[in-house]
Image (tube, helix red, strand yellow):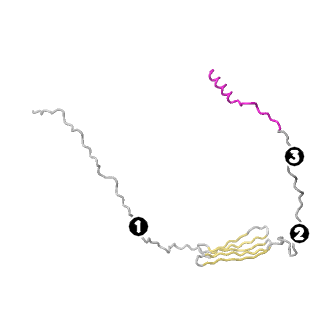
Amino acid sequence: MKVLLVVSLAALALAAPEGPRPTYAPAPRYHPTPAYTPAPAYRPAPTYAPPASYRPAPSYEAPPKYDFNWAVKDDYSGNDYGHQESRDGYNTQGSYYVQLPDGRLQKVTYHVDGDSGYVAEVTYEGQAQYPAHQPSYHPTPSYHPKPAYHPTPSYHTTPSYHPTPAYRPTPAYTPTPVYG
């Protein structure tokens, strides 16, 4: 018990900080005199009038008005799609179409009138066709590789060691025949 008390007092003594405790006080005030001369007063650069050919920026306040149309038709790849749209102010209408892989033509006709939102009508032309798959290309290998390495087994199926017995047991006595 006394040893425990001595050890704990020694631990407290070693954990205590050395030296005086710090005091908190504001830093001393120090105002050196500047060693430089102040910069001269700022004067803005002169402004120039725009050249005589200057036009004011265009105003984009006018309602939008446009019309466009494009299409792709490639018989080799089977691509067939397009888009048409026209807009006059808040009234927009248009359509687009695409040739589907099953042979049908999907058409979407839409319009937007003010705040009514996007209203679309989707239609399909033609019947879906799913022909049986017939591959047009049957690859055949141009060579038939043969393995160049034929490993021979590193083990033998018959044991290479044939132990011979160190002794031959013989009976310790010879029994005498009993005739009767």
Q: Residue at x 80, y 35 (%)?
A: 24
Q: Residues within 10 Å of mark 1 (few under 14, many from 20)?
A: few
| Disc number placed over residue 48 in the picture, else none | 2
Q: Residue at x 87, y 71 (%)?
A: 50
In the rendered structure, which amino acid carries the disc numbered 3? Thr
User: Of callouts 2 and 3, which one flags the residue occurring earlier in the amino acid sequence?
Assistant: 3
SS type, badge 2: loop
Image location of residue 148, percent across then percent down: 38, 64
Image location of residue 160, percent across then percent down: 29, 49
Of the residues tagged 3 and 1, which is closer to the observer?
3
Q: Residue at x 67, y 77 (%)?
A: 71
| Disc number placed over residue 123 in the picture, else none | none
In the rendered structure, which amino acid carries the disc numbered 2? Tyr
Q: Quadrant of the C terminus?
A: top left
User: Of callouts 1 and 2, which one flags the residue occurring earlier in the amino acid sequence?
Assistant: 2
Q: Which residue is mark 1?
A: 145
